[in-house]
Amino acid sequence: MRTIAYAVAAAVILAGSPAFAKKKTPEENLEIPMCPQVLGTVAIKDSQNEWWRQYNLGNPAAVIKLIVMKSGCFQLVDRGQGMQMMREERDLMGEDELQRGSDIGKGQMVAADYFVLPDLVTQDSNSGGSAIGAGIGGAIGGGWGAALGGIKTKKLEAQALLTLTNARTGVQELIAEGTYKKTDVSFGFGGGGWGGFGLALAAAGGGYADTDIGKVITLAYVKAYRNMVTQMGGLSGNARMAAPLPAQRLLERTALLSEPRDDAAPVRGLREGMVLHPTGNKSGLFWEVEEPNGDRGWVPSELLELAK
């Protein structure tokens, strides 16, 4: 009987050992998409329902920022603490506290083409699991029993969402989903495979690099991000082109011209202060615009300023 018990114990341990398991660990599937060209600028917004607190995790915005920076798909603009620090620098500049030539002023900030809102739909953090080897371990005793008693069943699952909103139009361009599930029998979550991303994730803190549920949620976000970038192949790839051009205000009374030249026939008269909508067509110093009644024509660009 003792020989049979040892044989059973050895079989269970070898089946659960990462060295003999055929399953891939979640870390091996971590592939952040790399883009050959930048799709635009993006700002990461905080989730409304602070779900991460119940798992003792940090704000997932830090995880998304790391993924974005690693991928090279977007330029990341700071709308958080960095933004506040910028405002403080501008205040110092306005108070003449900074050295001459510091070159801090209006008109230097880069606009966000998109906003990304991370969220989580479902999650299962059965981190304790159930000790399937406790009974066998108690019967066998010794070193075998100690090893078997440490085997846990764990089921971790996360469904992450990334909502992409066009910053100019306010239109939600897409909602990308990423689901990651881990169900296995092992001594731990597995090791390796995170590389430099894992080190950066650990440095950012929040528990995403050193907890099972944190790793699973991270991988779910990686999948969601990959799906988002893939879906953006159907977009123009440039929000400045996809969104309507900003409206312009007419600085002085003039005529809406039928052609882009000074002596062209007038379509109608335009009054000072009218809001005109550029079509995107330009010819020399003239812009084609559409006035509120729907008439199209040309006006000198020097008579236009951004409507606020």
Image (tube, rainbow, N blue to C red):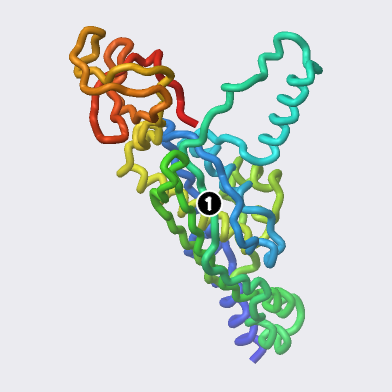
Residue at point 70%, 74% (across, down):
150
Q: How many marks?
A: 1
Of 139 and 214, which appears nearest the observer?
Answer: 214
The residue carrying mark 1 is: 117
Q: Position of residue 224 (x, y in %)?
A: 46, 54
Task: Identify which amino acid the numbered label 1 is placed on.
Answer: Leu
Instruction: Tell me the residue at 59%/82% (across/down).
Output: 8
Determine the residue positioned at 53% across, 55% down: 219
Q: Is residue 285 above or below residue 87?
A: above
Q: Height in image: 148 above or below 294?
A: below
Dot 1 falls on a residue whose secondary structure is: strand
204 or 151, nearer to the observer: 204
Describe residue 47's horizontal placement relative to residue 148 as left or right: left
Q: Is residue 51 left or right of residue 92?
A: left
Work out whether residue 72 or residue 128 is closer to the camera in this orientation and state it: 72
Q: Looking at the image, which is closer to me, 228 or 109?
A: 109
Tell me the quarter of the picture where residue 47 sits: bottom right
Q: Residues within 10 Å of mark 1 (few under 14, many from 20)?
A: many
Residue 274: image location, x then y, percent: 39, 28
The image quadrant of residue 107 is top right
Please tell me which residue is depicted at 57% across the width and 59% down the height of the picture.
217
Q: Quadrant of the N terminus?
A: bottom right
Residue 81's place in the image compared with 264, above or below, is below
> Which image quadrant for residue 44?
top right
Relative placement, left or right, of 32 versus 257 is right
**As drawn, which residue projects farthest toward the bottom?**
1
Query: How far across and down, in percent of the image, does residue 283 sit?
Result: 27, 14
Examine the rendered structure and indicate whether residue 124 appears above or below residue 210.
below
